[in-house]
Structures are given as structure tokens and as C-alpha cells.
Image (cartoon, rainbow, N blue to C red):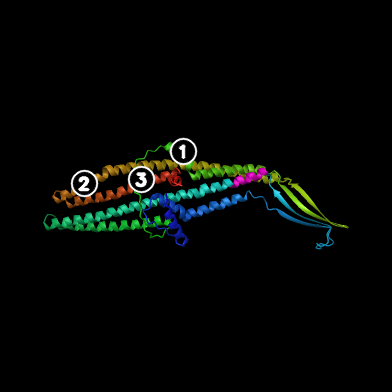
Amino acid sequence: MFPFLKMIVCGTIMLMGLSRCVFAQPLTRDEAVQAALEYNPEVVAAYHVWKAESARSLQAWAPPDPELELEYDGMSGAFNFGSFGQKDLGIVQRLSFPVAWWLRGQVGGLQAQAVRLGGYETTRQEVALRVNLAYDRVLANAQIVRYSEENVQLAEQLFTRAQTRFAAGDVPQLDVMRAEVAVLRQKNQHMIAQNNLKVSQVSLNALLSQVNDTPLALADSLAYTSEDLDLDVLHHQALMHRPELLGVQQAYLGARKKQSLAVASTLPDVSFGVFRQTVVTPTGSQKFWRAGIAVELPVWAFLRQRGQMSEAKAQTAQAHAQRDQVKLKIGQEVDAAGANLKAAVERAKWMQERILPTSKAAFEMAGRSYDAGKASYLELLEAQREWVDTQTEYVETLFEYRAAKAQLARATGTLLNSLENEH
């Protein structure tokens, strides 16, 4: 769970006017996602769009404002309000037919839910995915930097060995020059790796709404585990959890309600009025109470209803087509993400169990053979290059595994389940 103390610190800093949230303790992947969901401007904007739509949906339940009526009768002049025969003061309230009022409120609520699911929840899923990818990219680049440091040291050791053998007259000066070039190239690769790490840290800090140079200490790793994938189960999870699909389903229900509302629009509105009546007589003024009710005559409702029905039918058909389109897209994404994850697991396993140890053993053997004069420096250099490339390739394979796992969780709509279950 995202530590409460970190939330207090981050909130305090945000209130001070700084978009910075520094984590003193190592940051886990879930904590990074939670921080982004709290402070990322894209998520905050989507949240307020949903809240605005929710506020509009509440307005659908409100009846029209009452009218205050004041009427003078029997005046001696057009504006002689002091001389009248009768004065009526009252309030008139117009009310929709209950069925139409109820349906109007239902439509507003369904539209708000569609915005929440299709906008806000979808944005949260997308931002969470980007945070996962950025987090693992930092981990991968940090590991590549560590490997590049080791490779610089290794190249320097080979350079020293070449110098020693050249001094003994065992190898030509060309081997020494090649060894020096190898050191320089490894140092260049180390600088590139350091720059890539800085760029990836900037990307993660941006997602967390932190200053670009905020130090990051990440607690998780790129370790992989075997994955038992059942596509039928994954497709079912996607249909149950994907917010985009749930959003278009709410939009479809709202369009259906609009059709019913168009039919109900032929039902008459009713107005109620209560008046205080003052009547002037030769003997003085007398006061009475008067109440009235008026029922709307929907004479032209069929013209209005015809357009409303056509609009509602078109919106229903559109929502139905969008729902089918989203279902098809989700199915494709689940299949692709599942295939990518399965392939990534196989590659990571193959790299860890076969390629990585074999490449390391070949390099060590080439080093021993070179020292014994049984291998040329070119053979040693080639073995070193393969070992260096294999290390980087292994890290990239682990990153691809983590990315594929996050993509599958996003495709099934379960990316935020672990976070939501903690609250």
C-alpha cells in the first residue's frame, strides 16, 4: 500500500506550490503507480471532466424554477398600480410527467457513468501502464549501466594483459592497440548507457509529476516467472473489467433510455399555482386564496417526438456499433498481449538458462586460451563482444517480459486490481 507518510509529504509539497514529490524510501512499482494516479495532471483532468458530467446529471432531476406571478385587474390607468379592482399574487410550479422526469434523470446518470468509465477510468489504466513501462525502463537502464561499468573494468583488464604479453614478446603491438580501442569503446558505451538512464528517469519523474532531476530509488526488479495463460479466462476478465467496454455499455443503455424518453415526451406537463387574491369592493378590500392546475396539451408533440425518436434510434445504433467495435478490439489486444507474454517468458528462460551461461563460459575459455597462447586476440575480442552483447540482450529481454505482462494486465482491465484491493 502507498505509505501514508509519503502521501502527507507529497501533499504538503504540492500545497507549497511545487510539482515535486520526493520519496526518501525505495519506491515500489505499485507506489509509483499510486503516486501517478494521485498527482498526474492527465488523471486529474479526466477526474474533473467526470465530476462536471456528474454535476450535469444532477441537474436533470431538478424541476423548472417556480414562477412568481403578480397580476393587477381593473386599474384606472395602464401604470396606475395604486388603483385596481383586483390583485393576484402567487407562485406557479411546472412539473414534468413523472415518467419523463424519471427517464431524464436516468439518462443523465448513465451518461455520467459512461464518462467515468470511458474517460476517467480508462485514463487511469493508461497512465498506470505508462508508469509500469517507465519504471521498468529505469530498472533496465540502471542494470545496463552496471553491466557497462563491469565491461569497462573487464576491457581494462584485457588491455593490461595485452600490454604484459607484448612486453614479454608474446603478442604484437597491434593486439595492444586493439585492446586500447576496446577500452575506449566500452567507455563510450558506458556514457551512452548513463545518458539513457537519465532520460528514462526524466520520463518516470514526469509521469509522477516530479521535478525532472528528482532522485529515484526503485525497490522492485525485472525478475520473471513462468506464466500459465488461459485465453478463455483472459477474454472473460477483459469483458468484465475493461472500462472502455463498460463505458460504451453505459452509453448504449443511455441511448435506449433516450428512446423511452422520446415516447414519454408526449405525456403532458402539469403546472400548479397558489395565489393570494385581493379584491376591492365598495365596502373595502377582501382577501381570498385561490389554487389552480393547468395541464399541457401536447398538440404538436408528434412533430417534436418524431425528431427525438430518430435521434435516439441513431444514437442507440451508434452505441451498439461502438460496443461491438470495442469488444473486437479488446479480443485482439488480449490475444496479442497473451502471445507476447508467452514468447517473452520463453526468451527470458532461454537467455537465463542457456545463452547467458554459455556466452560467459566461452569468454572465460577464450581468456584462458589467449593467456596460454592458444587463441588470438581477435578471438578473445569476439568472445568479449558476444558476452557484452548477451548481457544487454538479457536485460532487454527481461524488460520485454515486464512490458508484456503490464500490457496483458491492461488488455484484461486488471492492471489496477492489486492497488484497488488494498483500499
**Residue placed most toward the observer, 422 or 51:** 422
Q: Secondary structure at mark 3?
A: helix
Identify the residue under disc 1. 236
Q: Secondary structure at mark 1?
A: helix
Label count reads 3
Q: CA distance from mark 1 to mark 2?
A: 47 Å
Identify the residue under disc 2. 362
Kindly report the secondary structure that dominates the magenta region of the rendered protein. Answer: helix
Determine the image quadrant of residue 249. top right
Which residue range is magenta in the image? 98-108
Q: Earlier in the sequence, mark 1 or mark 2?
A: 1
Q: Would you say residue 152 sits in the magenta stretch? A: no
Identify the residue under disc 3. 401
Q: Are marks 1 and 2 in contact (CB under 8 Å)?
A: no
Q: Secondary structure at mark 2?
A: helix
Determine the image quadrant of residue 206. bottom left
Residue at 53%, 44% (x, y): give it: 248
Q: Which residue, as the protein is rendered here, is positioned at the far right?
A: 282
